[in-house]
Amino acid sequence: MPTKGIQLDANGKLLHFLSIEGLNQQILTEILDTAESFTSVTDRTIKKVPILRGKTVANLFFEASTRTRSTFELAAQRLSADILSLDMSTSATAKGETMLDTIRNLEAMQIDMFIIRHQDSGSAHFFAQHVRPGVSVLNAGDGQHEHPTQAMLDMYTIRHYKQDFTNLRVAIVGDIMHSRVARSQIHALNLLNTAEIRVIAPSTLLPVDTESLGVQVYDNLEQGLLDIDVVIMLRLQKERMRGALLPSEKEYFNLFGLTQERLRRAKPDAIVMHPGPANRGVEIESSVMDGNQSVILQQVSFGISVRMAVMSMIVGQSGLQAKA
Ligand code: CP
């Protein structure tokens, strides 16, 4: 999906945030640094800065969401934007209006930024091509393609706990084939020069060209977890599976579920991550999810600062201004 020319202007400034593919290490690092400057804002009694004062942000979620939708909304509020959150299942698209007509009508209400989650891969890119100049689109997850702000909050979490990507072994475990999160994470980990990226999955849940993404493939969880610093678990994306790709969830847990015993194969200080929603007893044992190596809820908290960072960079403000 050729998003590079749309996402950045001639000076390399963010216009839209559609995919990690097409970005560069400098932008990713600027997002992480800017997000860090916003953590002090989220710790204040009055959690607001005026960076988006006078701007209007519309949250358009055509698919279910808990974390992404709420943290984008909080991030926009903390930047002092006006925020409009539409439940697309009750919007006029449910009466046959095209998505483009919905966008045109919202543009007529002077929306400055659209945050869009949609079941179709490429939808965020499509919207970005059709909005008026000066209006931005942020991808909150498009089909199986990308979920770039999720990947950035994951990179923030890894940097927070492990500092340097260049000596890290990171494992992504589970349904790689249907995961927009995995795709964005792999691009981001490569751009940040991660020493080794492993994907661990049954062959039925791997895209055909997985190795070409710059990862090492394992079909055995015990082997794949050996000496790992960061374990990222993924859920089975059943809503995107066509046909039976697995015998049963029980069988899947028996072979690919992260248990305390299996986690001992990783380094003793390994962190366990999950973008959510997690299915206890399917891809992860409850005691691991709630255990002291799990940073799953911290990921959610960091999501607010990271989304504040992306929105503020789009309007031309970066970390240093945010700190002031
Ligand atoms: N990680 C993630 O996208 O979660 P939600 O579906 O709850 O937004």
Image (tube, rainbow, N blue to C red):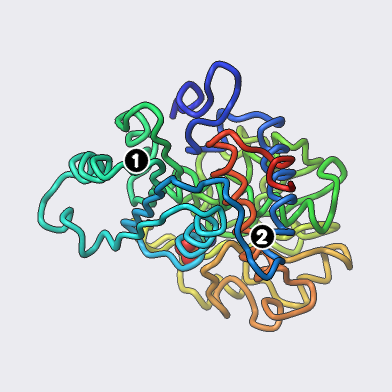
- The vertical placement of 272 against 240, above or below, is below
- Nearer the N terminus, badge 1 or badge 2? 1
**Residue lying farthest to the bottom in this orientation:** 287
Direction from residue 223 to residue 285 in the image, left or right: left
- The vertical placement of 210 against 239, above or below, is above
For label 1, the crowd category at 10 Å Cα-Cα, with few meaning under 14, some 14 to 19 and many 20 or more, is many
Residue found 25% across the figure and 42% down from its top: 103
Residue found 37% across the figure and 64% down from its top: 64
Residue 142 locus on image (x, y percent): 40, 47
**Looking at the image, which is closer to me, 288 or 84?**
84
Q: Amino acid at mark 1?
A: Ser
For label 2, the crowd category at 10 Å Cα-Cα, with few meaning under 14, some 14 to 19 and many 20 or more, is many
Q: Quadrant of the N terminus?
A: top left
Asked whether residue 9 appears in the rendered view, the answer is yes
Asked whether residue 236 appears in the rendered view, the answer is no
**Looking at the image, which is closer to me, 241 or 191?**
191
**Residue lying farthest to the top in this orientation:** 10
- The vertical placement of 2 against 230, above or below, is above
Q: Amino acid at mark 2?
A: Phe
Disc 2 marks which residue? 302
* Mark 1 element type: helix
**Looking at the image, which is closer to me, 187 or 99?**
99
Residue found 87% across the figure and 44% down from its top: 167
Disc 1 marks which residue? 123
Residue found 58% across the figure and 71% down from its top: 283
Residue 225 locus on image (x, y percent): 77, 60
Residue 282 locus on image (x, y percent): 55, 75
Point out the frontmost of discs 1 and 2.
2
- The quadrant where residue 183 appears: top right
Residue 141 locus on image (x, y percent): 44, 50
